[in-house]
Image (cartoon, rainbow, N blue to C red):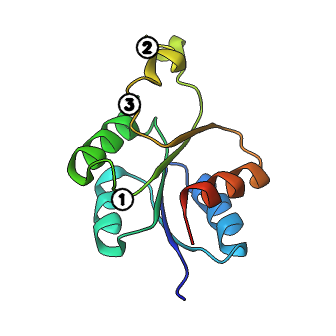
């Protein structure tokens, strides 16, 4: 059986590296991108079993918009999405709270940075069956 594939899109290369190392230790095949344009190409090329996505990249809601577009195209039975992001800071102009956004965030699980490796693996295993 081939390794499950995970795509990580986060503009912080250290986060990409850290998540990749953790997931690789558990036998996952990991692909990374630091922006959603590159991430989309990697996503299409690899057809992953899971997408791990940051919210705030070039714009405050880039990850949310990306997740919304993916879910719109793939439908409810598409690739599961795990958001790993810091809470959007109100002082940087983000006017909504996370609780207000959870009603429309198109993700299966939201994890707030910093994350614990054990919690990451637990949530990945919930979303990636088999």
The residue located at (49%, 50%) in the rendering is 10
Neighbourhood count class around disc 1 (C-alpha, 10 Å): few under 14, some 14–19, many 20 upward: many
Quadrant, the C terminus: bottom right
Secondary structure under badge 2?
A: loop
Task: Tell me if label 2 and label 3 are in contact, CB under 8 Å.
Answer: no
Residue of label 2? 93
Q: Which residue is nearer to you in this view: 7 or 48?
A: 48
The residue located at (23%, 44%) in the rendering is 72
Q: Which residue is nearer to you in this view: 109 or 15?
A: 109
Say which mark, if any, is on residue 61.
Answer: 3
Would residue 15 be found to the left or right of residue 35 on screen? Answer: right
Would residue 77 be found to the left or right of residue 29 on screen? Answer: left
Residue of label 1? 39
Secondary structure under badge 1?
A: helix
| Distance in Å between CA atoms under marks 2 and 1 | 25 Å
Q: Which of disc 3 and disc 2 is earlier in sequence? A: 3
Q: In the picture, residue 103 is in which quadrant?
A: top left
Closer to the eye: label 2 or 3: 3
Residue 48 to residue 88: above or below:
below
């Amino acid at each position: 059986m081939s390794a499950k594939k995970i795509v990580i899109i986060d503009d912080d290369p250290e986060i990409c590296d850290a998540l990749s190392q953790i997931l690789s230790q558990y036998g996952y095949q990991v692909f990374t991108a630091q922006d959603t344009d590159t991430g989309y190409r990697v996503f299409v090329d690899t057809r992953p079993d899971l997408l791990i996505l940051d919210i705030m990249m070039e714009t405050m809601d880039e990850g949310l918009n990306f997740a919304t577009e993916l879910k719109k195209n793939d439908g409810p039975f598409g690739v599961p999405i795990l958001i790993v992001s810091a809470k959007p800071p109100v002082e940087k102009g983000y006017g909504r709270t996370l609780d207000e956004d959870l009603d429309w965030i198109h993700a299966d699980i939201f994890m707030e940075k910093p994350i614990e490796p054990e919690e990451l693996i637990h949530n990945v295993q919930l979303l990636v069956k088999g």
